[in-house]
Amino acid sequence: MSAPTILGSERIPSKPALLFPNRISCAGLKALHKICKGQLSILIERNFRPGAEMQALISKLRMNTIDFDLRQAKPYLVRDLIICEFDAGKHVIFLPGVISSCPAGLSNIPAPYLMQLGSLHIAPLPIFCCCYGNSVRDIVCNEARKGISELMCILPRLAPGPQAGERCLAAWMSCGEEQFRKQPHLNKSLTSTLVRALCENRKAQVTDGMTNNSLSYFKILGVSMTVARQLQQRDDKRIGIILPPGPGAIIATLACLLAGLTPVMINYASSRTAFESSASQAGLKSYITARKFMEKLPQFSWPAQQQLIIVEDLLANLSKPMLAANVLTAKIAPAALICRMFDTEARRGDDEAILLFTSGSSGDPKGVALSHRMIMANAAQCACRLNLLDHEAFLGNLPIFHSFGLTITMIVPLLCGFDLVTYPSPTDAKKLCELVADNKLTLVCSTPTFARAMLRRAKPNTFHSVRHFIVGAEKLHKQLRDEFMNTCGVELLEGYGLTEATPVCAVNLPDARPLNSTPYYLPGNTHGSIGTPLPGIAVRITDIDDESKEIPFSEQGMIWLKGANIFSGYVGQSPFPSEIFRDGWFKTGDLGSMNLNGFITLGGRLSRFSKIGGEMVPHEGVEQLIYDILGLDPNAPEQCLSITGVSDEQKGEALVLLTTLDEHRHESQQKKYITSIRTEMMARHIPALWSPKYIVPVESIPVLASGKLDLRNGKLLAEEALCIKAL
């Protein structure tokens, strides 16, 4: 039982205090007992007892224990017990018991105890305990083991006052973010780490779901090394990649990294204007693509022929002896030698690794440079939180120009040495279901829209092997979640991310099995939420109208994030745009709240709100109401209505209902429909401000290739139809 590293021991006051750790080991308790010079009493809840080893240590150290029953004891009675120990000159530590929880969680303390903390009216001294390793899969752990070190941080005592539980959670979260950021593993080169992972897992395979051909990791590395030598001869700093998910995209990306170039993932579903904007911002002169892919995508605004590096031609012209030598080197040589051959440590840490562009849902696409540190951080955050086993098999069907597809379905399996089955289209539901079943895949990522299509094609045993089916990019409706579980026996797990955060920030997980020894447990998921923040991410919520004012987690406001996976500015703009960065915190643009178990519930995008007569009206909330009033299915494959906002002289903004419904086509009937909607809303005690002022019939609701609403074009449609000048 090695002692943990302790930071901030000087913060333990001479006068007795209430110590409140997020979790604690036997070694940690022993160290605290020593720091407190033996003057330490233990506060234990009768239904939440520590394990046998901890109880033996308490007995050995002859520490006084205070028992209470959370479900029966009044807060003032527990307070009196603590005060008695204070009067005897002893510090008191609340000792979290053995509990069922998901891996790499922030805390082992369920919400009822944090609520109890606030009711005691004793200012606590938060203690943050965590364990850190040196690999992607165990950089953050709940307990120390071989190669994993334990860290204990004693934090400043909280100010007295209400909501102590929320403030304690915030203190743990902030400390967790700070300590995660300091982990030396994140300073490494992504390229070097990929090379080492490919060498350590040489027999793992990437399978092309189109052809069923497989390439082992060492062949992927050998071909990438050969292509990298060709790319090094070019006068490029960044190279665009216009390829779907597959071995070719992996080789192109890895070859660019080995060559010291930045791969720029091009959205081949974007408009000409968006593509040209992205290419200009990135300063691109060359693009890697495939002739077969070009034939399947004639509508894309392809660059000039002389700018294209065609994969088929590139591979055909490679020196066969050099290719054979590099594949052999990748098969037998140590990773350190290959890293030296390509000087992979020349770019690392905060250096640019990969460039992506935002979807442009509310404007032109913005360039987000993902650094080596950001990608390493988010890969580690996801890998340790998902509790990945020794052998997993991923489905790689999401486009790599989307950060979700890039990080989770390409980078993570490569770094962890897992088999990967790729497929170029996320919309071919029938084929995707076959690939999952035939290859016994264990992790699938998708959007609710694509998952719904897979559900229609699935057989009862299609997803039998799947341990995690994670969906994001749009809201997961309860109906789809329940239908998926009832039909396929698989729980859809909603997550949340942003391109600017590489991208995953929070995720729901399968519930851990409750223990018989305690009625309390930490849930893995809560429907309607986006899950809990990943390790190393801190959350702050501010007032919508005054972003300098921080508000409690339980109140809805603007969500701000902080973490090693979050970027520092858009390409071509100042490093820290003041409108979205403040004191190291990133403004997400999303509204939401967080409960004491850490689950975040979104209230919508700020850009999907209109301020009408001084009140914030949520577009998504209005949409859901109108769907219900009209008796429509919000889960239908094609969206038939959408709410947007336009400027209004009287009230600042007005709501506009974009609709594809036949009954809304005729202008003479539109006022009648608006009146009926308003009347029904008022009957449901919904403010009249929530009623649309205008109806605009459209042929289709504008959406992006990702399935998200195209907010910008939806707004433009409304403004043009109503001849209203933009805000």
Image: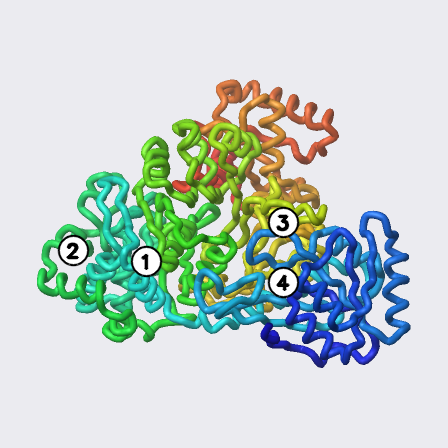
Q: Which mark is residue 306?
A: 2
Amino acid type for the residue under numbered disc 1: Val
Residue placed at 85% from the left, 48% from the top?
72
Whichever of labels 2 and 4 marks the residue nearer the N terminus, that label is 4
Residue 540, position in %: x, y? Answer: 64, 59
Cα separation, mark 1 vs mark 3, equals 34 Å
Whichever of labels 1 and 3 marks the residue nearer the N terminus, that label is 1
For label 3, the SS is loop
Judging by the rendered image, the residue that carries numbered circle 1 is 264
Q: Nearer the viewer, mark 4 or mark 1?
A: 4
Q: Nearer the viewer, mark 2 or mark 4?
A: 4
Instruction: Using residue 144 as the reference point, say whether residue 684 is left or right of it.
Output: right
Judging by the rendered image, the residue that carries numbered circle 3 is 599
Q: Quadrant of residue 437?
A: top left
Cα separation, mark 2 vs mark 4, equals 51 Å
Residue 355, position in %: x, y? Answer: 37, 60
